[in-house]
Amino acid sequence: MLPPFLPALVAALITVALALGAILARALTPAAGAVAAAFGIVIVLTAGYAFLALLILFVVASVMATRFHIEEKRRKNVQEGTAGERGISNVLAHIVVPTAIAVGVAVGPAQTVPLTLLFAGGLAFGAADTFASELGVLSGKARSILTWRPVTPGTNGGVSLPGEAWALVGAATTSVVGYFLFRAFSTPTAGFLPFVVVVTVAGFLGCQVDSVLGETLENRGYLTKGSTNFLGMLSAVALASILFLALGGPL
């Protein structure tokens, strides 16, 4: 159900203002900021404020992780963009799937409970992937996810124990924050334990799928970074669906 006109207008203006702030802070390129604003408006108008709030917190956490020790990352040439800013392909890779899920809430409100899990699972992947790459790369060591041979930090498919730990932190934090946001905005969702387990596991495993795709397909030129991230998020949503059904549906 669409929000009333005035709250919807306010939410849209807030979304635009936040996107503009991200552009001015050089966290997003102008094109990426415009795309983020447009998709964010669709999310809040179709699914409501809890969904937008979780998306905003994901973006804020991603920016903080990206900017963390940015000068060190630049020296090692492993930074995002030229100075930590994210472009349109990165934004699209992380927002198309959540937006489609949000639209699903408006189309089939009876399915809101599983859709909250899928939405949070997708963003949990985004947080896990961002934390693993932006914080894990600072460990200075990485190994191939498939062969466990040492690789240069920042290499597609390269993982490290600190990076994996940060991926788990990102997924778990998203699950807990997401649960309480949905509850705070009276959005129907699953119980605390099932929600946290499904979202955390889906986000973390989706991050591993992303690494495998990066090593096997992106490194060979079959995928771009954006398409790898998109498929990684799609896998996380699929895993959340499977886990939801495996646990018996409505929880």
Image: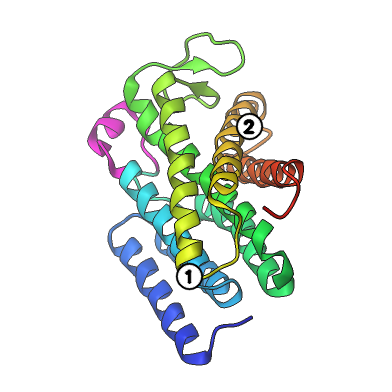
* Residue type at numbered disc 1: Phe
Residue 109: give its label: none
Q: Residue furthest bottom?
A: 5
Q: Nearer the viewer, residue 251 or 29?
A: 251
Q: Position of residue 106 (x, y in %)?
A: 67, 74
**Earlier sequence position, callout 1 versus callout 2:** 1
Q: Residue at x 49, y 41 (%)?
A: 171
> Quarter-wise, where is residue 227 in the image?
top right
> Quarter-wise, where is residue 137 in the image?
top left
Q: Is residue 83 at all visible to an observer of this figure?
A: no
- For label 1, the crowd category at 10 Å Cα-Cα, with few meaning under 14, some 14 to 19 and many 20 or more, is few
| Quadrant that contains the N terminus | bottom right
Residue 176's place in the image compared with 131, above or below, is below
Residue 198's place in the image compared with 165, above or below, is below
Q: Residue at x 39, y 23 (%)?
A: 162
The question of residue 77 being in magenta is answered with yes
Q: Residue at x 61, y 53 (%)?
A: 117
Q: Is residue 116 left or right of residue 14?
A: right
Q: Is residue 135 left or right of residue 105?
A: left
Q: Is residue 121 at all visible to an observer of this figure?
A: yes
Q: Is residue 108 left or right of residue 157?
A: right
Q: Position of residue 220 (x, y in %)?
A: 65, 26
* Residue type at numbered disc 2: Val
Q: Which residues are magenta?
A: 67-80
Colour convention: rainbow
Q: Position of residue 92 (x, y in %)?
A: 56, 56
Residue 116's place in the image compared with 234, above or below, is below
The question of residue 246 being in magenta is answered with no
Residue 209: give its label: 2
* Separation of marks 1 and 2 at Cα, in angstroms: 32 Å
Q: Position of residue 185 (x, y in %)?
A: 48, 70
Residue 185: give its label: 1
